Amino acid sequence: MGRRKVTHQLISDNATRRVTFRKRKHGLLKKLNELTILCGLRACAIIYSDYEEGPEVWPNRKEVRVLLNRFRALPVEKQTKFMMDQKDLMNRMIQDAKKRLEKEQMHSRAMELGLIASSNDIRDADYSEDLIKAADVVEKKIKVIRERIKAVESGAAILMIE
């Protein structure tokens, strides 16, 4: 049986919502169990729902208490190190996108400088600073190539680094 795309919104039918909750909760706890077994770590889950009285805890109340006490014993900096709200998440995504953009701009600029250096417009005074940068890029590439040649000649393993 194939899966269909799920729209993330409140399920209007109460019975369907309850069944979906039960299935997804089971899947979540199964994944959590697999994670603890395969990665050898300790984890717990606390699930509140309208369908059961009180919270449901996994794996058991004693383990949850031990892990929560261990968490509370940590300094506040460590407790909140990986916590973020929607604003923090968006800021992180924006920073990552800016870094990727800068990297792409540097790559594009290096390609542009290579084209300038290989063209007949080298004598143009406007490009003197750009040509120096292009020469630096070319020198770095030549150095990497020479290092690879030496490694091949010496019989060492070669790592391809992009």
Image (spheres, rainbow, N blue to C red):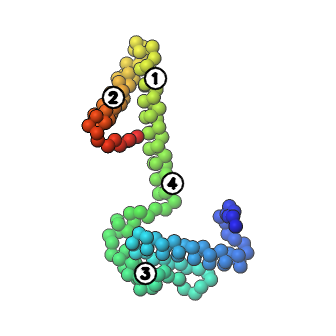
Q: Residue at x 31, y 33 (%)?
A: 149
Residue type at the position of mark 1:
Leu
Residue under numbered circle 4? 90
In this orientation, which residue lies closer to the viewer: 109 or 140? 140
Residue at the spot x=59%, y=80% of the render? 49
Instruction: Say which amino acid is labelled 3.
Output: Val
* Residue positioned 46% across, 84% down in the render: 60
- Circle 1: is it few (<14), some (14-19), or many (20+) Cα within 10 Å? few
**In what quadrant of the picture does the N terminus appear?**
bottom right
Q: Which amino acid does label 4 sit on?
A: Met
Name the secondary structure under disc 2.
helix
Location of the C terminus (image quadrant): top left
Helix, strand or loop for disc 3: helix
Q: Mark 3 points at which residue?
A: 64
What residue is shown with label 2?
142
- 3D distance between C-alphas at marks 3 and 2: 58 Å
Q: Position of residue 19 (x, y in %)?
A: 67, 77
Task: Tell me which residue sits at (57%, 73%) in the image.
Answer: 27
Residue 147 visible at all: no
Dot 1 or dot 4: first in sequence order is: 4
What's the distance in space between the residues labelled 2 and 4, CA to CA? 40 Å
- Percent x, y of residue 13: 73, 75
The nearer-to-camera label among 1 and 2 is 2
Marks 3 and 4 sit apart, C-alpha to C-alpha, by: 31 Å
Query: Which residue has dot 1 on it?
Result: 115
Q: Distance between the residues labelled 1 and 4?
A: 37 Å
